[in-house]
Image (spheres, grey):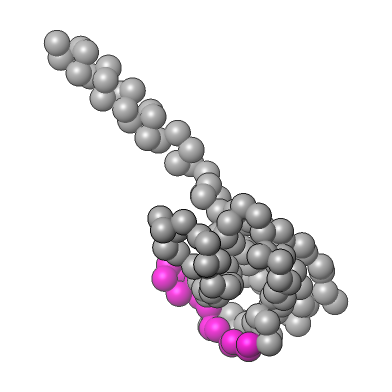
């Protein structure tokens, strides 16, 4: 009897741990960027028959903090990000849910900009971008200068 319980516990553990190693699971779009100072990353998000523009760059890295400039649909933000947990992420609500969205879909689509690391030798900031939205949205990248 104990062998059956042990085998059942192992099977349940394997079932729930499948895919747990992929940190990008559950995100509709994700990418990593290595940006030099004042290099602008442009992102075009097409969703719900509308086009949204996201652009970000960094201007200063001092004492472990990265000063970023973020523009989303004309709204400007200037977050200060650090590479440690809870201070490494900036969240942007992308657009409101469509009126015909299912009642189970409570969360508004959003993007996260995550400061991962700074390469002192190359003077580059490594930033992850993750987007959670519906499957019908399209994300296009355009590298800036």
Which residue occupies the foreground of this view, 18 or 62?
A: 18
**Picture residue at 26% right of the left edge, 20% below the top:** 8
Q: Position of residue 77 (x, y in %)?
A: 59, 87
Q: Position of residue 11 (x, y in %)?
A: 33, 23
Location of residue 8 with respect to 83 vertically, above or below = above
Extreme front residue here?
100
Location of residue 16 with respect to 94 vertically, above or below = above
Q: Is residue 93 located in the magenta-colored stretch of the structure?
A: no
55 left or right of 112 in image = right
Q: Is residue 85 visible?
A: yes
Extreme right residue here?
145
Q: How many marks?
A: 0
**Picture residue at 37% right of the left edge, 35% below the top:** 16
Q: Is residue 121 visible?
A: no
Q: Is residue 84 located in the magenta-colored stretch of the structure?
A: yes
Extreme left residue here?
1
Which residue occupies the foreground of this view, 120 or 47?
A: 47
135 left or right of 46 in image = left
Task: Using the rendered view, name the quadrant where residue 67 is placed.
Answer: bottom right
**Picture residue at 46% right of the left edge, 56% below the top:** 102
The quadrant in which the C terminus is found is: bottom right
Task: Using the rendered view, name the quadrant where residue 18 is placed.
Answer: top left
What segment is highlighted magenta in the picture? 75-88
The quadrant in which the N terminus is found is: top left
**Picture residue at 63% right of the left edge, 87% below the top:** 75
Location of residue 79 with respect to 19 vertically, above or below = below
Location of residue 10 with respect to 34 vertically, above or below = above
Which residue occupies the foreground of this view, 136 or 21?
A: 136
């Amino acid at each position: 009897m104990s062998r059956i319980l042990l085998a059942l516990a192992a099977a349940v553990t394997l079932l729930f741990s499948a895919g747990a190693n992929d940190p990008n699971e559950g995100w509709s779009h994700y990418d990593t960027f290595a940006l030099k100072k004042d290099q602008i990353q442009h992102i075009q998000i097409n969703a719900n028959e509308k086009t949204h523009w996201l652009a970000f760059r960094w201007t200063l890295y001092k004492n472990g903090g990265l000063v970023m400039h973020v523009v989303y649909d004309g709204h400007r933000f200037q977050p200060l990000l650090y590479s440690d947990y809870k201070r490494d992420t900036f969240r942007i609500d992308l657009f409101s849910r469509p009126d015909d969205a299912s009642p189970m879909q409570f969360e508004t689509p959003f993007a996260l900009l995550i400061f991962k690391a700074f390469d002192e030798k190359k003077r580059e900031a490594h930033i992850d971008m993750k987007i959670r939205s519906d499957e019908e949205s399209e994300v296009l990248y355009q590298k800036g200068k």
